[in-house]
Image (cartoon, grey):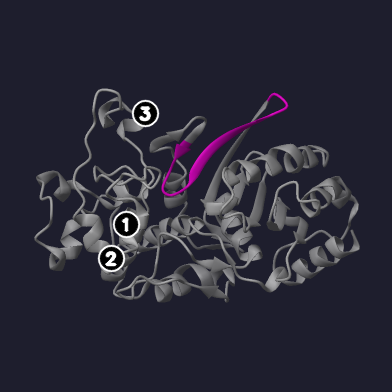
Amino acid sequence: MLRTFALAMAACLAGIHAPCWASALSNFDDIGAAVRAGTYKQITSVLVSRRGELIFEQYFDDGGAAALRNTRSATKTVTGMLVGAAIDRRLLRVDSPVLPFFADRLPLLNPDPRKSRITVEDFLTMSSLLECDDENSFSRGNEERMYLVEDWVKFTLDLPIKGFPDWTSKPADSPYGRAWSYCTAGAATLGPLLERATKQTVPDFARATLFQPLGIDSVKWQFQPLGYAMTGGGLELRSRDLLKLGELYLNGGKWQGKQVISQDWVRRSLAPHAHAREDTDFGYFWWLQTFHVSGQAIQTYGMYGTGGNKVYVLPDQGVVVVITTTNYRLPGAGAVTDSLLTSLIVPALTGLGP
């Protein structure tokens, strides 16, 4: 408990406004005990902020607060933020067709006139007509197939148009008019597209428009074989900096009085654009999920990555939760993290009162 309080006080000095009292932290005693007992397997950190105050912070590995954590596909949400920054600067449009950025990748394998109508928004919402599904090992666009080749942009644009047999939902019949499938290739293609739109590398553009304004000074990108930053996964950030990203969107794109991402982009990003799963819609690389806790519906939007690495924002409660893990090979790891949120964290928040 003393270590938790010390970490909270240290966070106050780091720019996240931690409270100078520890009484509320007692509501979270069960979280640390359960994680250390292995109930949720390999959890590495849990952070909770409420109305801008860091009320819980514990680390369960040797890295501590300074460690960079590979949160896998939570990177995609950061990519959506960078697309928004480019649009805010009028360097790109959300309805911009993708193909004109890659004239050097033509002609395409599997040519189809419908490919010319694929837009940035189609990739942001994982609802392009390309046959790409990471959750189907038979899919030609499965990310594991992409990792075997050198040119990931060419891989993506060469994919065939997907088919819609009778037993699947066609886009026109789907909620929001989009047929969703999880596609890392589209997210990875947005990196090279951003570089061509902004005339900067993704790391440089991210540093200037997002990371420096938030005081994020320690990051590690992964890179594609041709040298582009991997915008589909693998970005390493500190847990406190993940918390800042959640706080940024909770505050409508504003950080310490400065508008970093436009309020309009935040609003559009968090609007439902496709239906992903039961109780879960999809925005611009944000997961819009409803949890049910003791008969109460808890609305969230989140950054999700393999292993159950997640940043949850609970807008009605003014809360941001960061949970990082190394449960990469654990089946159902996302549900394990969700259980930690719903079984322990949300009830602890309820105990704090209004």
Residue 51: image location, x then y, percent: 70, 50
Which of the two marks, 2 or 3, is nearer to us in this view? 2
Q: Inspect the image, locate mark 1, and give the three-letter code of the amino acid beneath it.
A: Arg
- Mark 1 and mark 2 in contact? Answer it, CB < 8 Å: yes
Q: Which residue is mark 1?
A: 145
Residue 133: image location, x then y, percent: 34, 45
Residue 283 lies within the magenta run = yes
Q: Is residue 251 visible?
A: no
CA distance separating discs 3 and 1: 29 Å
The residue at 70%/64% (across/down) is 16
Q: Would you say 47 lies left or right of 225 here? A: right
CA distance separating discs 1 and 2: 7 Å
Q: Earlier in the sequence, mark 2 or mark 3?
A: 2
Residue 149: mark:
2
Q: Would you say 190 lies left or right of 5 here? A: left
Up the image or down, 232 lies above or below 208; here it is: above
Residue 181: mark:
none
The residue at 15%/65% (across/down) is 105
Crowd around label 1: few <14 · some 14–19 · many ≥20 (10 Å): some
The residue at 45%/61% (across/down) is 233
Q: How many marks?
A: 3
On the image, which quarter does residue 64 sit in? bottom right
On the image, which quarter does residue 69 sit in? bottom right
Residue 235 lies within the magenta run = no
Range shown magenta: 281-295
Q: Would you say 181 lies left or right of 321 here? A: left
Up the image or down, 342 lies above or below 160; here it is: above
Q: Which residue is mark 3?
A: 175
